Amino acid sequence: MDISVVIPLYNEEESLPELHAWIKRVMEQHRFSYEIIFVNDGSTDRSWEVIEHLGSENPEVHGIKFRRNYGKSPALFHGFERAEGDVVITMDADLQDSPDEIPELYRMITEDGYDLVSGYKQKRYDPLSKTIPTKLFNATARKVSGIHNLHDFNCGLKAYKKEVVKNIEVYGDMHRYIPYLAKNAGYRKIGEKVVHHQARKYGHTKFGLDRFVNGYLDLLSLWFLSTYGVQPMHVFGLVGTLMFIIGLVAAVCVGVLKLIALYNGGDYTLVTDSPYFYIALTMMILGTQLFVGGFVAELVSRNSQERNKYQVEKTV
Ligand code: UDP
Ligand code: MG
C-alpha cells in the first residue's frame, strides 16, 4: 500500500464526509493505493456514526474509537500503530489542511528521501491571538531541538516514512514536537513544504490558551529528557558537587579568619554575623540536595524498562 492517511478527530461530524470525498478524489486521480484511518478521540457528537457509515460504503476507510477524549497525541499514536502504507500522512479533520498536498508530500518522502516532511502554513488563517504566540513557540522549539529548518513544528499536515511512525512514541501532548521525537530517534532528514491553509469551516478549535503553557513545559521536559534523561547524575552530580565544594571552602575561610582574628587578640564579632557564613551554609545544603536528587534520578533511570532500548537501523 502506498499511503495511510491518519486523521485524529474530536467532534468534527460536519467536516468528515467532505474531507473523505476530497481525499478520495486526490488519491484516485493519482492512482495511489491507500487507506484512511479516522481516530475518533471520544467525540460527543455524531462523528462515529459518520465514520461507520463511510466505512460501510468504502473499504479503504477504517476507524478507531476511543471510549473518552484522550487528546490528539494518543489518537495519532493509535493511528500510527494501525497504519500499513509505505508513507503515512497525518492531517487535521477540520478541513484546514488540504488533501491536494498529498501527492507532493508523497513524492518528497519516496523520491527525495526525507524521513519526515512537515507542512508549513506560511499564510495562516487563524486569529492573531494564535499566530503570534505560535511564532515565539516555533522559534524556541527550533533552538532547543536543533532542527533549524522548520518554521512550523505543530502543523497537523505531515508525511512520514512508515518506519518513523513505528519507532516514535507520541504521548501526552507531544504531537507538537514530533519532528524532535523523530530526530531523537535518529531520523535526521527532516524537511518542510509550504502548504495551503484555510480558515476552519465548521465547528471551533479544540485547544484553549493553555496550549502555550503546556507546550513550553513539554518542550522543557523533552529537552531535559533527551539531554540528561539517560545520565541525570552527569548534570545534578556535577552542579551539586561544585556547589558543595565552594560552600565548604567558604565555610573553612570564615572559620580560619575568625581563628586568625582571635589569635591576633580579641575580635569579638561572631562567625554568624558574617553574611559569608550563611552563603556558605546554603551552598552546602543546596549542593547536597542536588547531588542526592541526581542520585535518585539515576536509580530511577537505571530501573527504567527503556534503559536498553536503542534504535537499531540494520544488522547483517
Ligand atoms: N483533536 C483531537 N483530540 C483533541 C483535540 C483535537 O483529536 O482532544 C483533533 C481535532 O479534531 C482536529 C485536530 O486535532 O482534527 C486539530 O485540532 P484543532 O483544529 O482544534 O486545532 P487548531 O487547528 O486550532 O490548532
Ligand atoms: Mg484546526
Image (cartoon, rainbow, N blue to C red):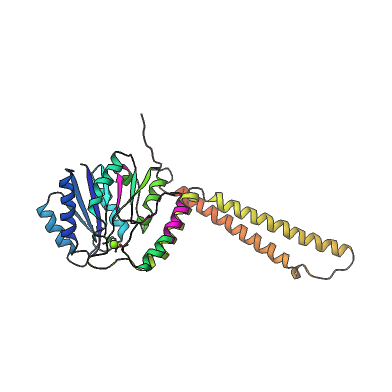
Quadrant of the displayed image that contains ligand 1? bottom left
In the picture as drawn, the residue positioned furthest to the front comes out as 123
Q: How many labels sit on residues?
A: 0
Asked if residue 82 can be seen in this view, the reply is no
Question: Could you tell me residue 141's position as x and y percent?
Answer: 44, 55
As for residue 175 lying within the magenta part, the answer is no
Look at the image and give the residue range highlighted in magenta. Answer: 136-163
Residue closest to the eye, 140 or 8: 140
Question: Could you tell me residue 80's position as x and y percent?
Answer: 28, 49
Question: Could you tell me residue 211's position as x and y percent?
Answer: 38, 64
Residue closest to the eye, 145 or 74: 145
Question: Could you tell me residue 177's position as x and y percent?
Answer: 38, 54
Q: Is residue 35 above or below residue 12?
A: above
Q: In the image, 259: left or right of 290?
A: right
Point 23% across, 47% down: residue: 4
Which image quadrant: the N terminus? top left
As for residue 153 lying within the magenta part, the answer is yes
Point 37% across, 56% down: residue: 176
Q: In the image, 260: left or right of 232?
A: right
Q: Is residue 311 above or below residue 97?
A: above
